Image (cartoon, rainbow, N blue to C red):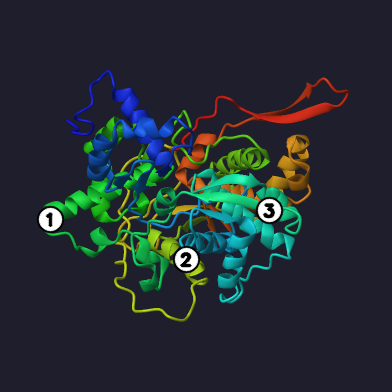
Amino acid sequence: MSRVAEGVSPLELADYQKAVRLVLRHPLVTPGYPDKAALAAVRRWADQLRTDLMEVLGYRLVTTADTVRLQRAQDGLDATRPALTRAGRPFDRRRYAYLVLTLAALGRHGAQVALGELADVVAADAVRIDGLGLDTARKPDRDAFVDAVTWLTERGALTLADGSATAWAGDPERAEALYDIDREILLAVHHPTRVLQHLTSVTSLLDSSGALGLSAGRAAQRRDQARRARRLVLENPVAYYADADSELLGQLRAPALAEDLERLTGLTVERRAEGVALVDTSGRLSDIRFPGGGTVAQAALLLAARISAAVQRSGRHALELLPAPTAAERLAARARHIDAALPSRGLVIELAELAELAELAEQDEESAYGVSVYEASGDEGREPGGTRYPFVTDSWLRGRLKEITAEYGAGFAADLRGDPDRLLGQALDLLAAMSLITRVDGGALALPLLARYRGVTAQVRTRTVSQPTAQTTLFADPTAKDPTS
């Protein structure tokens, strides 16, 4: 029987699980973020949360008078949870750089700071970084800087006392903004687990104790592997057995994993032959909801249905099967992309290297996500990547998106409808984030979970509004399942 939430009564278990989901969804909780009730809801269960999150996941919960900070143990590099701009777009590298420089600059200020003054300090630091800079005479630079400041304001590290950041971004000669600085929240926002000056690769930020065998004793190593397995299921839409090394595979299949995660989160663990998923039908824990609203999500859903239908073809129309990149290869590719932005001066030898991941385990169960979704090869003559998945080419994907746009384009946003390459790229990124496909050179590989969207249908419905004009919206099949976790 699970020992999770031992000190919580059955009548209060739902409230406790709600607090768990809240702090997992929002690793930083302050008096006003994500809302005014969140801090009290989490602090009520602080002691039990601290115990369970460490025991089950290896996460450390740090509480102060006005903050709750969850320090995650990261096993991989996840591009699906970026900081967002005021317009809801992911931060680019320039905005991330401005955010970090702003944090450093705020540490040298008193109780208040004017936005223009803060921009000048950040600009003085940015000009020393090759390829960055901050020119307050340029509107794009001001907008990027205000996005970084707004991100801190939303979390309470800065509080607008007077003026307007938007007005300053429009005309810094005529407008100004004054901010109060909350040092307790500022410290909680920037709480690195490593000495950043010692890092030569982003992979040094990952939790590598289990991979390196640093834990003392076999029992401790099994505990680390169990935590890693639970994190894999919790943090991803699905944990595929084909991506797991041999030690992790046993933990993913252990009954205790489902028992502990269900008891901790209040969600349902679903097992299939290909892997394990933590199903969040409410969407309150998920950072990405799929199916969802908006042009990109609707196009991705319809594209998923077409890929899934193509996977079912047999004979001479069957798709080619190719091995997917291994977890280690995907990690290495992402690390190279991020490390390309590291400065080349002032670095020291990396403290530790991540161990190589073991070969993927052989699948031995009949597919339950969809028959013939993939083909597993035997141990003999196994190719890199092990399991082979149906491959669709970029040209095939462009053709299917053209068909979708022709049929349902009236419900799409005009800017994306007129830029099919951008729409296709964003739709494929969303499918990849949901572990429905893996993007490879020349196209994409269909993963097992994609079979759930084989029967998706949609229609364009026109709604009459009070004005003489009509408003067109795309509605997807409401019966489609939501596998987000």
Q: Residue at x 46, y 49 (%)?
A: 182
Q: Nearer the viewer, residue 175 or 310?
A: 175
In this rendering, position of residue 232 left or right of residue 320: left
**Badge 2 local density, few (<14 within 10 Å), some, or many (20+)?**
few
Dot 1 falls on a residue whose secondary structure is: helix
- SS state under label 3: loop
Name the front one of labels 1 and 3. Answer: 3
Q: Are marks 1 and 3 in contact (CB under 8 Å)?
A: no
- Disc 1 residue type (three-letter): Arg
Q: Which residue is mark 1?
A: 218
In whole angstroms, how far apart are the C-alphas of marks 1 and 3?
A: 60 Å
| Residue drawn at point x = 39 percent, y = 45 percent | 235
Position of 61 with respect to 183 (left or right) is left
- The kind of residue on which mark 3 rests is Glu
Residue picked out by circle 3: 176
Seen from the viewer's position, the closer of residues 243 and 31 is 31
Per the image, the residue denoted by label 2 is: 333
Which amino acid lies under the numbered mark 2 shown in the image of this protein?
A: Ala
- Number of numbered discs visible in the structure rendering: 3
Q: Give whichever of discs 3 and 2 has the lower sequence position.
A: 3
Instruction: Using the rendered image of the protein, determine whether residue 383 is visible from the camera's viewpoint.
Output: no
Q: Is residue 214 above or below residue 283?
A: below
Task: Give the camera-side residue of 375 and 198.
Answer: 198
- Looking at the rendered structure, which numbered label has been put on residue 203? none
* Disc nearer the start of the sequence (1/2): 1
Residue 337, how many percent across, how many down?
51, 67
